Image: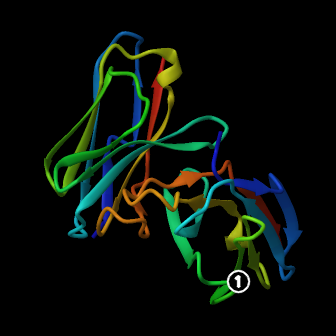
Amino acid sequence: SQQGEEDPQALSIQEGENATMNCSYKTSINNLQWYRQNSGRGLVHLILIRSNEREKHSGRLRVTLDTSKKSSSLLITASRAADTASYFCATDAATDSWGKLQFGAGTQVVVTP
Amino acid sequence: DTAVSQTPKYLVTQMGNDKSIKCEQNLGHDTMYWYKQDSKKFLKIMFSYNNKELIINETVPNRFSPKSPDKAHLNLHINSLELGDSAVYFCASSPNRGTDTQYFGPGTRLTVL
């Protein structure tokens, strides 16, 4: 089964609203990453949070990590139509130093004008 | 100036054929990956090479054979294609074999008829 699982599977919001999605994982990790995939395109890295960090910001993105609950959240503030995409969390296993990321199935976000 | 490029973008072929997908990165990275994304958007790692050396080899049918002629290139050859091989294949690279940010190519959509 996938290491990371996103919730919800799909999210529909209006421009200007905030979008929050969650990721749960099973094993201890070194870091957790969030990626965005626009329709028909490759994945684009958004943000990386290490296991000893609790919160990280990048522009309109805010990521939290709770290693005790094995969960992370991605918040997109003041969403725009261009934020319409699928968002994936990716985790590694703390015992794995080979760069093997495990992805969830993603949250599909639709932002309507 | 494309960082990670893949060819072809689309590949339509008959069952039983052999095909190759090429990947090149101009980022100077040491590590490259092949991922398969199925119709439900699950992204699963297949292979990884670090400086032309195979370091990750997931449970993939041996009809799939990666080849890395140099650290900037990682090609994927598939023999005896089957219907279940239909998917989008992504190449990615990262600076080294640790769990760093990965940079993805645009994907190759393979359709097996």
* Residue for point 47% across, 24% down: B85
Q: Is residue B31 visible?
A: yes
Q: Answer yes or no: is residue A80 visible.
A: no
Q: Residue furthest top?
A: B16
Q: Quadrant of residue B51?
A: bottom left
Q: How is the image coloured?
A: rainbow
Above or below, A94 against B78 in this view is: below
Quarter assignment of residue A69: bottom right
Residue B102 placement (x, y as % from top left): 42, 64
Residue ID at (22%, 66%):
B26
Q: Nearer the viewer, residue A83 or A50?
A: A50
Residue A47's x, y, as percent?
56, 76
**Residue furthest to the left:** B69
Q: How many numbered discs sit on the rendered protein?
A: 1
Q: Is residue B84 left or right of residue A28?
A: left
Q: In the image, is B109 to the left or to the right of A52?
A: left
Q: Could you say whether the residue bearing mark 1 is in a helix, strand or loop? A: strand
**Image quarter for residue B24?**
bottom left
| Pointer 1 local density, CA inside 10 Å: few below 14, some 14–19, many at least 20 | some
Query: Is B57 or A106 nearer to us in this picture?
Result: B57
Position of the N terminus of chain B, as image quadrant, is bottom left
Residue closer to the observer: A66 or B105: A66
Give the residue displayed 78% in from the left and 84% down from the top. A77
Residue wearing tag 1: A62
Give the amino acid at mark 1. Answer: Arg
Give the residue drawn at x 67%, y 48%: A105
Disc 1 chain ID: A
